[in-house]
Image: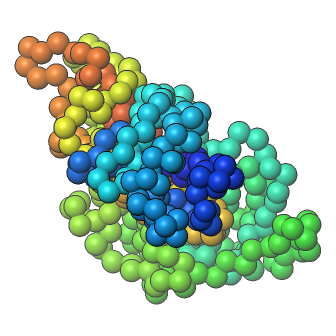
Amino acid sequence: MTPVELSRTVLRAVRRAVDAGELSVAVPARAMVAPPGPGGCGDYATNVALQLARPAGRPSRQVAEILRTHITDAEGVSGVEITGPGFLNITLDGGAEALVREILRRGVRYGYVDEPTGRSRLLHHPCEVRAAVTAQVLAGILRTQGILVRTSCERELDPAWAGPLGVTVGAHGKPGAPAAPEDPDVNLRPVPAPEDPTPLGRDAGRWALLHPAPHDRPRITADHLVQRETNPLFRVRYAHARARALSRNAADLGFDSAPGDVRPKETSNPPSSLLTALADYPPALTTAANHHAPDRLARHLVVVADAFLRYQEATQVLPLGDEKPSAAHRARLALAEAAGTVLAGGLSLLGIDAPEHL
């Protein structure tokens, strides 16, 4: 169960409590769920009881007790605890293990919808480098959501930057009529690049164009090439390389990964942060598609990379010295491989190389 799905589960619990006459409140539009903070427990926590206490005219812990039963009865939830003034701490059925298994099973197609939706889009853009790269990447993101996509450019692409950046387009000229009223054409006009990005190379050039929001002016500078923590692209690619290195090192030690629940073995927050970032990857793809904003994907890859690097720093993934590989080591390695898989899939959609070594 992803955080988005769990949020819907919490809202359904509120609605059941209202329908049963246990609470007299308006069902909120959203319920925030996040990894539990200090003093919390379980997989996720929500403050929805505190949010509803005043309109319900009841103490927040009393509201939490009412909601606790309805959330506990939901499919995929194994337990709910109340902490503090009324935080609901939710434990899922095999949440971490199921998530890691799903990612490793789906591979780089994790987050893709299973069936075509029957919807279509034509992405039309001017003959400008940032618009062309944005259209190409957005087309790939829309396809992950089951949408049939075509691209067109006002005129033929400039080979001086199209070739070095790996840009392609489906057609040239003025677009025709939309296939259906509910599938309007999309005219992409992000803020143009202030200068030629090709001197940065394909990977850094694409990142420089895609990482900023479409309405922001991109920076075409050598900062995108530096191999330092201040460079988000470096962190994303380095995190992928570290995940792959862990798999190679484990193979040298004679063991491989096996998904399991890593969190009971841990005492710090990085595993929960990483699991949340991985679970949020499919919603990030959906958001990027709905808002026609590839930067949403690029920015989420930075979130995944940073969470993974913190996890790796705080966690002994591989056995040390004469220590024998345990189930915990295999589960931790599986989580690292899941992170690497998500990073590889996201970078591929951006048209950027995911290095094995860095």
Question: For the point 54% across and 28% down, which residue is it?
Answer: 105
How many badges with numbers are in the image?
Answer: 0
**Residue 240 visible from this viewpoint:** no
Q: Which percent across, then down, holds residue 22?
A: 59, 52
Q: Which percent across, then down, holds residue 289?
A: 64, 62
Q: Which percent across, then down, holds residue 32?
A: 47, 59
Left or right: where 355 falls relative to 321 = right
Left or right: where 62 falls relative to 269 = right
Above or below 316: residue 168: below
User: Residue 180: which quarter of the image?
Assistant: bottom right
Q: Residue furthest left?
A: 321
**Residue 254 visible from this viewpoint:** yes
Above or below 121: residue 319: above
Q: Which percent across, then down, holds residue 1?
A: 53, 39
Above or below 65: residue 245: above
Question: For the point 71% across and 39% down, which residue is it?
Answer: 114
Question: 352 or 283, which is in the foreground?
Answer: 283
Question: For the point 37% across and 24% down, which residue is it?
Answer: 260
Question: 91 or 321, which is in the foreground?
Answer: 91
Left or right: where 180 falls relative to 68 = right
Coloration of the structure image: rainbow
Question: For the point 41% across and 60% down, which residue is it?
Answer: 59
